[in-house]
Image (cartoon, rainbow, N blue to C red):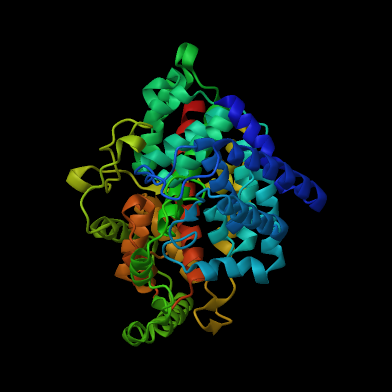
Amino acid sequence: MEVQDQESLGRWDGLGSRDVSSRTEAMENICQDVMRKVEAIGPMPALAPSPPASGSPPNSDLNDILAHLLMLSKRCPFEDVKEQCIRLLQAVQDLGVRIPRPLGNGPSRFIPEKEILQVSKVDARTQSIFEDAFAALGRLDNISLVMGFHPQYLESFLRTQHYLLQMDGPLSLHYRHYIGIMAAARHQCSYLVNLHVNDFLQVGGDPKWLNGLDEAPQKLQQLGELNKILAHRPWLLTKEHIERLLKAEEHSWSLAELIHAVVLLTHYHSLASFTFGCGITPEIHCNGGHTFRPPSLSQYCMCDIANGNGHANHHDDLLGNQDMCGEVEVLMERMKQLQECRDDEEASQEEMATRFEREKTESMLVVTAEDEECVPSRDISRHFEDPSYGYKDFSRRGEHVPTFRVQDYSWEDHGFSLVNRLYPDVGQMLDEKFQMAYNLTYNTMATHKDVDTSMLRRAIWNYIHCMFGIRYDDYDYGEINQLLDRSFKIYIKTMVCSPEKTTKRMYESFWRQFQHSEKVHVNLLLMEARMQAELLYALRAITRYMT
């Protein structure tokens, strides 16, 4: 297994080079390799038996390479590599070998493919970031493509993620990917699990660990409880949880290792939220991203009807726009009125506290989704324990959770320095990423220009923290109900607390007149606010243990 992985790693490496001749040489080697494998199996008879249920014929090594070439022909940011992959696949098909085709319609189930792929064509900076990402990872994943609507943020995100996974740090590389698998599995995010299973094996991880958490080392198994609480009920985390990890005799964690693990867990919990919130589809070369079955004409027609190909998407739906006519203007008018009220009067501290408690209580009444509990498949749930443990609202059944006051423990004054001290540079990178998401603005709302959206961005961020019990003393929580309507609150709560239940209908039902890029911006805010909320609880528990 490992030998093959090393060989395949070397095979694709050169395609990420900025040097055209290096890419050409790498591509020639791949062509020769593919043709040798094709000749070895001989031509396929015209009436070949049907492939097995997976839609993939037996020659698995060749099929993996063909699937990888298909991915490159669609996603590689270098045009020369794209074209050569298309030619090579055609040559293989001409020799009678079945080649794969992509499933689905682009990187997202919610956003038209042409809109996503258009971004790098018109923006040189985005194209350059895509090239860097491809050079570092050998792929341009669907998450990056969708984040490409916001290149400044994408740059910060990729820099941070690259540092967490690949640069010097307290944890070994295979531990990092395994922790990513554990975190993503808590939300049944097969997209992220599959990516990191591949990465885990590529860096020499033991395949046995992938049979389930109970096959992994005791040290990683002990992280299961922290993973569970952080993902679903971070307010329950105490210094005793931290102490058990740091004092587990021969399986104990160091403080630096624990900080690295906490940052990875929170990164992947929140990235699972983004993945579901944007309807991210499987990578073309991964399971569920391609098939070797030939398309039938009737299938094509059905797909086109089901996916609305060639038809206007919901933003161009005239009836929808009539229904929602004036949605943006109403929101802008409310922002203006709130600003005037702010200038005229200031509520007392008691009134501010009451408004927070009211909003916190109301947030419990927001139902996340119509469907029943999602039961994780065995394939995903083996990477964590206690599948039934999920998000629960604070004060249900009389449980009382004290409010977390940011004035007592904040990211800026406490968390940032703790992370930087134990895992140098990461505090700085996270801080830049939080600031980037929070402050990102193009001063537009749908078709309106020169709009100050800071009030709206702050309402979204603070609403998410409010759901986690986190309170800002200087914020008037009465503004949230004025700015976030019920369908938007349902979407936010589902995506942040139970992302696996996010549906296309929920994505389409909020802010119907806004651009897809604006909805992706909302998802970046939700992801970063969630990550910071989890981090605050974890870092406060670590600080309490240390003092």
Query: In which quadrant will I find the N terminus?
Result: top right
Q: Nearer the viewer, residue 118 or 533?
A: 118
- Left or right? Give the position of 453 relative to 276: right
At x 64%, y 30%, the residue is: 6
Classify residue 210 by image quadrant: top left
Q: Residue furthest left?
A: 397
Q: Nearer the viewer, residue 99 or 430?
A: 99
At x 29%, y 41%, the residue is: 376
At x 41%, y 24%, the residue is: 221
Q: Position of residue 198 (x, y in %)?
A: 52, 36
Q: Nearer the viewer, residue 278 or 335?
A: 278
Please indicate, yes or no, whether residue 539 appears anywhere in the rendered image: no
At x 62%, y 57%, the residue is: 86
Q: How many marks?
A: 0
- Left or right? Give the position of 477 relative to 13: left
Q: Position of residue 202 (x, y in %)?
A: 58, 32
Q: Position of residue 128 (x, y in %)?
A: 71, 59
Q: Position of residue 235 (x, y in %)?
A: 36, 41
**307 w.r.t. 210: above or below:** below
**46 w.r.t. 457: above or below:** above
**71 w.r.t. 260: above or below:** below
**302 w.r.t. 45: above or below:** below
Please indicate, yes or no, whether residue 299 appears anywhere in the rendered image: yes
- Left or right? Give the position of 87 relative to 542: right
